[in-house]
Amino acid sequence: MALGNRDNTGHAAPSETSPLLANAYGKTSDGKLTIVPNEPIEEQVGDDGRIGDEEAPEMGQAPNPLMEGLPEVAEKMHVLLPAIGVGVFLAALDQTIIVSTYAKIGSEMNALNSTSWIATAYFLTLTTFQPLYGKLSDIFGRKVALLSAYTIFGIGCLFCGLARTMPELIAARAFAGIGGGGMTTVVTVLLSDIIPLRERGKWQGYLNIIYALGASSGAPLGGVLADSIGWRWAFLLQVPMCALAFITVCFRLDLPAASRAHWVTRLGHIDFLGASLLILATSSLLVGLDLGSNTSWTSTLTISLIGASLPIYILFMVVEHYVSHPFAPSGIIFNRLLSPPLICNFFSFAGYMAMLFYVPLLFQAVSGYTSTEAGLLLIPGIAGSVTGSIGGGIFMQRTGKYYWLTILGYIMMVTGITTIFLCSGVLVTSTLGTLVAFCLTGLGGGISVTTTLIALVACADPSDMAIVTACSYLFRSLGSAVGVSLSAALVQQRLRYQLAKMLGDGEETEKIVRGVRESLEYLEKLTPETLFAVPMTCESCVQDVSGSLHKLEGISKVEANLKDQLISIEGTAAPSAIVSAIQGTGRDAILRGTGTTDSSAVCILETHSQQLSDKVKGLIRMVQVSSSLTLFDLTIRGLAPGKYNATIRETGDISQGVVSTGAMWKDSAKDGPQGFKGRLGTVDVDGNGLGSVFIDKPIQIWEMIGRSIVVSRQHDGEGKFEKNDDNTLVGVIARSPGVWDNDKTVCSCSGKTLWEERKDEVGKGMI
């Protein structure tokens, strides 16, 4: 029977295909109250406060608290919302604030390979303590539980900002997660206590807006702070906000007194065994995923940890079934009305948090954005989350329906996440496509997180309201932890495989693979030392040249030898850019060597057009930085404006210019466009005839020696060239001296000094 059809009693009959259904209108088989998801809520509530077929209350009995809330407290919600909203904002903010700062944190502490635990430790304690807060708030009172959460979270943030080592920071993050778990759970329970069910969707929508703002603001805020005053302030600035929320709640929130039983009796009602088993099972799973992705999936420890998590989870569920005061009762988790929304919470948050963590990484690693820019690009996703959350709340307030709205929300999430995956390089690499898809994901997530919570509240017994809400957050945070860890494992495993495949085997490859996986900045260290001869007569000259070079992006180290008039430079800046920077000080520079003799090559580019007397038009410097990765620095002068293709040819025969160089160099083991090893890329020549490009390719120097390089705009370079022209350049690749290998000061062919030869080369157009 389809949802919304009427049975013989005239009531709406749920269908078996609906995941949020009762088996009958009014009460379930176990006697608990239900609300049909696609029927207006007010139509299921009688004038006397009855829900469905609930029996009318006896004379003098209070109306159903599920519907009425606490009117005297609800009148103060305009004052209370900012106070409790601060906690929700901070809890969400803290989950994502390390997204754009972990590279700087890890680099400063020399432990970048451990930074994933900054997030994992927070989610781990958040997952464990969120359900406990539901029970704690029942025992000690909502206000005490909320104030305790603010205090613990604030202290944890303070310790994060003061941490000196990675273990200290991870421990502080775990401590902050204990408080973060309460700031969201207790607030939602408070909302269920205070606000009538009919209005709950609207107010939950407001809180979800705050949560979305916090979660989505974490990345851009963290990036801005890390790039300006330092990453520590991303944590320290949360401390005064916690203090403000604590003071406001302390003096503004007045609730009925909690049970006055002795505190020892109260502690006996807390399920410490279940909490311990949950944290043990989750830790075992997450540590196993981390070890597998970073070391080996076949190691005994990895297999043991992942394998042990399942029986521990089973033991946890057994304990929750038999313990007297479970924080995640099996009757709730396995209830056929409540389990579908809980499962939806798990998978939706797993997908959303994975996207939230790795979309900024995609922007930085693939598109080349800074951490601040990558964080700011998440702002459109914030708009999607806000729109979905408040729109879903308003829709439910006006119609009282949520089933099909929930379905729509999850369809949008699946579509958005799938599109992000396809736009990350699987089909295309598109920043715009990723942004649009992330907006769609946020919109669907904002809708579904509101509707599923209302579904839980509507289907739960009033006496289970707090624990059901806590279970909702348990599944959300557990999904977040598993989603982030699983996606991290997949990313690391894929990165290891692709780098090893590209670079080959060997100790150097292992070093590079490890370095790239530990830091986005590692590539800056791949460029070897470059040595320049620079005329310098005093320390002032040294300071001028060094100061100019340090302004270049990518320069990591500059050392000057005044006696020998040499400058040694380490970094990723192109040699041509270094020469220009030195010339900007009024001095000239000659490249004396790059890397080692076996890892350096050079190619002088000239035209074979008979109409031109000045034939030398460019230069390509090459240096191999790993077992199979070479950097190319190409500079051109004196060509017509336009886009030129640079290719390595099969032969080094330039007796007839480009005509005799053959086709583009190709790997015989590969077919199609992917088989061309000689495609270097394109270079744009401006209106002044100048062009330059600095690129890297998975090629070894020895493979190129004796071949030729052609720069031309005749065609893409795959086939043979039919003619020479004024704007087609060619040269043979030859070895060049490495750093400290070139000690000559006089050219053997002309008898001129190197500086005299330099002037002649500049006059000819050589760079």
Image (cartoon, rainbow, N blue to C red):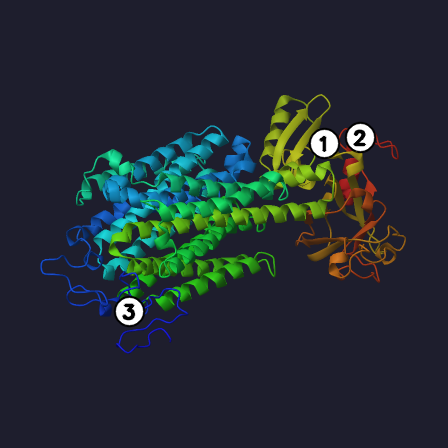
Residue 541 found in image quarter: top right
Check disc 3 and report its element: helix, strand or loop. Answer: loop
Figure label count? 3
Residue 5 horizontal side relative to residue 107, left or right = left
Mark-to-mark CA distance, 2 and 1: 10 Å
Q: Is residue 601 shown left or right of residue 341?
A: right
Marks 1 & 3, CB-CB < 8 Å contact: no
Most foreground residue, 251 or 10: 10
| Residue at the disc numbered 1 | 531
Q: Which mark is nearer the camera, 1 or 3?
A: 3
Q: Counting residues from the N terminus, which is met first, the one under dot 2 or under dot 1?
A: 1
Q: How far apart are marks 1 and 3 (CA)?
A: 83 Å
Q: Residue furthest left?
A: 60
- Amino acid of disc 2: Asn
Residue 200 in percent (x, y) is at: 26, 58
Compared with 462, 534 (above or below) is: above
Q: Residue at x 80, y 36 (%)?
A: 598
User: Residue 368, percent across and down?
Assistant: 57, 48
Q: Earlier in the sequence, mark 1 or mark 3?
A: 3
Q: Can residue 632 be seen in this view?
A: no
Are the residues flagged by discs 2 and 1 in contact, CB closer than 8 Å?
Answer: yes
Instruction: Locate residue 28 relative to residue 763 in the image: left or right.
Output: left
Disc number for residue 25? 3
Disc sitting over residue 407 in the figure:
none
Residue on which the image places disc 2: 742
Residue 221 position in % (x across, y down): 42, 44
